[in-house]
Image (tube, helix red, strand yellow):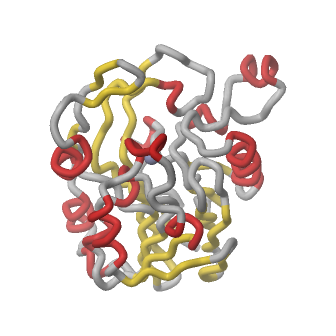
């Protein structure tokens, strides 16, 4: 059995909602957290993704000029709490993390991964092999030198589903990115699935009205390389546990420890 603690490192203020909910909520704005999840139990300490600090965002991602999306200007990423401070509050340092479970390598999920010099970093071979994936997704990925730094860490490439230990599994969930994976975690409160893609709660739990009108149980991610594949992955995630935990849902700001 494990516990799961969301640690929000930064915030994207007032982001376009349809970037998350495909063809839904166009023009609506949401504050989104950049989350890393601390998993503890069975003698293991793991992180699911590592997030991105506001400083790294300014220095390496935005690199001058405002953040633009579809012709609209958006505010900068704001600091909430650096990852090392989150860990320090819990008596941990980067070196105490046994495993980094890297769901995918969008910049908002991996900018801190280069700091984990002693951890084993588990990611899908297809996710890494396809970098850079396409000019269309330039804004989604970090600069090449960040991936070069990460490549010097202790990467373990996986080919599909992977059993880590009792109560902790990775499932292959591509479609948002070429080789995304999600994390299935058993806690005393039930089985949670950390969805390895950029989503909010509404993606997995749309309103009854939306479900009636679409005839579908989920809303695909607004950002995807293959909408059919990501839909199938999302159904798999939904069925893999009792509750889905999305990376960018507002509830992560105040959720506290689960299990
Ligand atoms: Zn994301």
Residue at 71% from the left image edge and 35% from the top image edge: 218
- The quarter of the image holding the N terminus is bottom right
Which residue, as the protein is rendered here, is positioned at the far front? 135
Which residue, as the protein is rendered here, is positioned at the far top? 27
Q: Determine the image quadrant of residue 185.
A: bottom right
How many marks the image carries: the answer is 0
Q: Nearer the viewer, residue 27 or 66?
A: 66
Q: Is residue 44 above or below residue 7?
A: below
Residue at 56% from the left image edge and 18% from the top image edge: 25
Q: Is residue 12 above or below residue 207?
A: below
Q: Nearer the viewer, residue 75 or 143?
A: 143
Residue at 50% from the left image edge and 49% from the top image edge: 134
Residue 75 located left or right of residue 124: left
Residue 185 located left or right of residue 4: right
Q: Is residue 192 above or below residue 16?
A: below
Q: Determine the image quadrant of residue 189.
A: bottom right
Residue 98 located left or right of residue 159: left
- Residue 115: x percent and y percent? 25, 72
Residue at 57% from the left image edge and 37% from the top image edge: 201
- Residue 98: x percent and y percent? 40, 82
- Residue 87: x percent and y percent? 26, 66
- Residue 56: x percent and y percent? 20, 52
Q: Determine the image quadrant of residue 148.
A: bottom left
């Amino acid at each position: 059995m494990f516990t799961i603690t969301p640690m929000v490192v930064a915030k994207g203020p007032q982001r376009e909602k349809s970037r998350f909910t495909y063809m839904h909520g166009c023009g609506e704005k949401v504050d989104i957290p950049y989350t890393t999840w601390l998993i503890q139990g069975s003698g293991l300490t793991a992180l699911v993704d590592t997030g991105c600090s506001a400083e790294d965002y300014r220095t390496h991602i935005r690199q001058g000029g405002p953040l633009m999306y579809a012709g609209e200007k958006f505010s900068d990423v704001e600091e909430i709490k650096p990852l090392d401070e989150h860990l320090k509050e819990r008596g941990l340092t980067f070196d105490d993390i046994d495993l980094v479970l890297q769901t995918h390598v969008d910049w908002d999920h991996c900018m801190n991964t280069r700091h984990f010099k002693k951890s084993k970093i588990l990611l899908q071979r297809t996710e890494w092999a396809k970098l850079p994936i396409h000019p269309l997704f330039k804004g989604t990925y970090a600069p090449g030198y960040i991936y070069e730094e990460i490549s010097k860490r202790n990467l373990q490439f996986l080919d599909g589903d992977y059993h880590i230990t009792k109560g902790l599994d990775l499932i292959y969930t591509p479609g948002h990115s070429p080789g995304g994976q999600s994390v299935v975690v058993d806690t005393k409160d039930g089985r949670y699935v950390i969805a390895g893609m950029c989503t909010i709660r509404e993606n997995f739990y749309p309103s009854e009205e939306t479900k009636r009108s679409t005839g579908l149980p989920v809303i695909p991610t607004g950002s995807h390389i293959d909408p059919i594949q990501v839909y199938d992955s999302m159904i798999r995630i939904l069925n893999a546990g009792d509750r889905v935990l999305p990376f960018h849902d507002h509830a992560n700001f105040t959720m506290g420890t689960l299990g």
